[in-house]
Amino acid sequence: MRRAAAERIYYCPVEVSLDKIGGKWKPLILWHLHARTRRFRDLKRLIPNVTEKMLTEKLRELESDGLIHREVYREVPPKVEYSLTPYGRGLDPILQQLCHWGKQHARKNRIRIESLAHLEIGSARKPGDRPASPQP
């Protein structure tokens, strides 16, 4: 039988952190929200391998934990936006460090990171375009 979160016993602060922000999808969601407020479809495009069901589930968990805010606008069709809460913003330095380490690791091991810059708002790039110079 699994204990409720409030009753769970942790043995390390990192375990607590990973319980809330760990896994395959939560760090990616938080990373994309750290830059700006996003709609569901934007997050789905930026995280192409996540299913809609899983994205919805993880967004709900992050909202329940107070890390993200879900804003519903009363219009037709309905508009929903997600953003980091001030509490969630506390993860910004950690997310920046993860990004930095990931770039270093990819460079060291010759791992290609596909740019999704063409999905950013206001981008002049189109899918399939290659950047003029390698990304730092």
Image: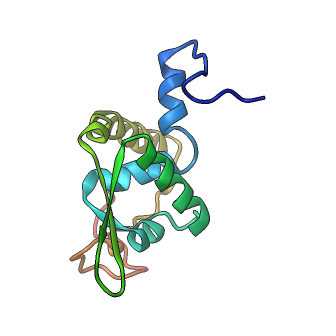
Instruction: Answer above or below: position of 85 versus 7.
Output: below
Q: Residue 46: x percent and y percent?
A: 43, 66
Question: Which residue lies at the image location 78% right of the left edge and 29% below the top edge?
Answer: 1
Instruction: Answer above or below: position of 128 versus 102.
Output: below
Confirm whether residue 43 shows in the render.
yes
Question: Which residue lies at the image location 35% right of the left edge and 49% below the top edge?
Answer: 68
In the shown orientation, is residue 116 left or right of residue 74? Answer: right
Q: Look at the image and name its color scheme.
A: rainbow
Which residue is outermost to the top?
Answer: 11
Quadrant of the rendered image containing residue 52: bottom right
Which residue is outermost to the bottom?
Answer: 76
Instruction: Answer above or below: position of 38 versus 118.
Output: above
Residue 29 or 56: which is nearer the viewer?
Answer: 56
Tell me how many marks there are: 0
Question: Which residue lies at the image location 37% right of the left edge and 50% below the top edge?
Answer: 31
Q: Residue 67: x percent and y percent?
A: 36, 43
Q: Residue 33: x percent and y percent?
A: 33, 55
